[in-house]
Image (cartoon, rainbow, N blue to C red):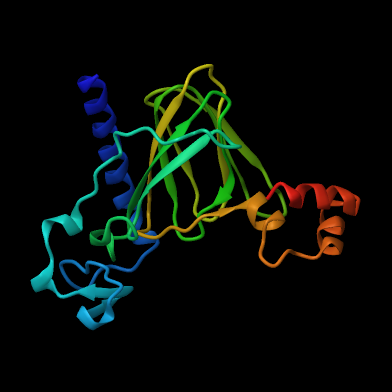
Amino acid sequence: MMKKTATHFLIAMAILASAISLASASDPSPLQDFCVAINNTNSAVFVNGKFCKDPKLVKAEDFFFSGLNIPGNTNNKVGSNVTTVNVDTLPGLNTFGVSLVRIDYAPKGLNPPHTHPRATEVLVVVEGTLYVGFVTSNPNNTLFTKVLNPGDVFVFPIGLIHFQFNVGKTNAVAFAGLSSQNPGVITIANAVFGSNPPISRDVLAKAFQVDKKVIDKLESQF
């Protein structure tokens, strides 16, 4: 078990290193050694993307996160769980232009179609078999897909809709590096059918070319 966990972390660090090489295409370069994010602006002395903690008060814990060895709870409607390590969970990432996630999938679990508006994503599978893909922008909307096995890597371009689906009979695990400390995520179905306040039924019915009753049913799911 220890050997397996160590292998997972080595792969995760390799993915994180790959994401760092992509960071220059997204977030601006830092202007000092570090800028540990802080919400209490009364204790902030520098600004670079977010308010920065006084360097004299910075501790090693500001650059530390623990728990990526723990499987996420996939007992939900889509059968997946994303454990995120970004500037909100690891303040020391601020201005570094990189973040990391662990994704757990139950059998037939799905990480639903979504986008990251501020980051390219590079994903590596460490357990199981995933069917992954992304769709290009208008007007072609070309779908690129691949079935991934342990050790396989796939890249999702910044801003494009993408997904992962566990096509195996066992649990699956993947790690991904993203080229932003705060990549953001827009889950398509949630945003369209679960917005607050709701998007007009007339708009959605016409956009999807379906009856309003279908829209009502879809919205009730979100």
Residue furthest to the left: 56
Would residue 23 be found to the left or right of residue 58 on screen?
Answer: right
Q: Is residue 40 visible?
A: yes
Identify whether 177 is placed above or below 200: above
Q: Horizontal placement of 212 versus 37: left or right?
A: right
Q: Is residue 132 above or below residue 139?
A: above
Give the x, y percent position of residue 114.
Answer: 57, 49
x then y, percent, for residue 215: 82, 52
Q: Nearer the viewer, residue 215 or 18?
A: 215
Question: Residue 98 is drawn in which quadrant?
Answer: bottom left
Which residue does the image show at 87% across and 63% down from the upper left?
Answer: 202
Tell me: 129 left or right of 161.
left
Could you tell me which residue is drawn at 83 percent across and 61 percent down?
201
Q: Residue furthest top?
A: 169
Asked which quadrant contains residue 150, the reply is top left
| Residue 45 visible to an observer of this rendering | no
Residue sitting at 25 percent across and 33 percent down? 9
Percent position of residue 200, x then y: 80, 65
Q: x and y percent of residue 5 in the render?
A: 25, 26
Using residue 177 as the reference point, say whether residue 52 is left or right of it: left
The residue nearer to you, when weighing 129 against 58, is 58
Please determine whether, in this image, residue 102 is positioned above or below residue 89.
above
Q: Nearer the viewer, residue 161 or 204?
A: 204
Question: Which is nearer the eye, 194 or 86?
Answer: 194
Image point 24% across, 19% down: which residue?
1
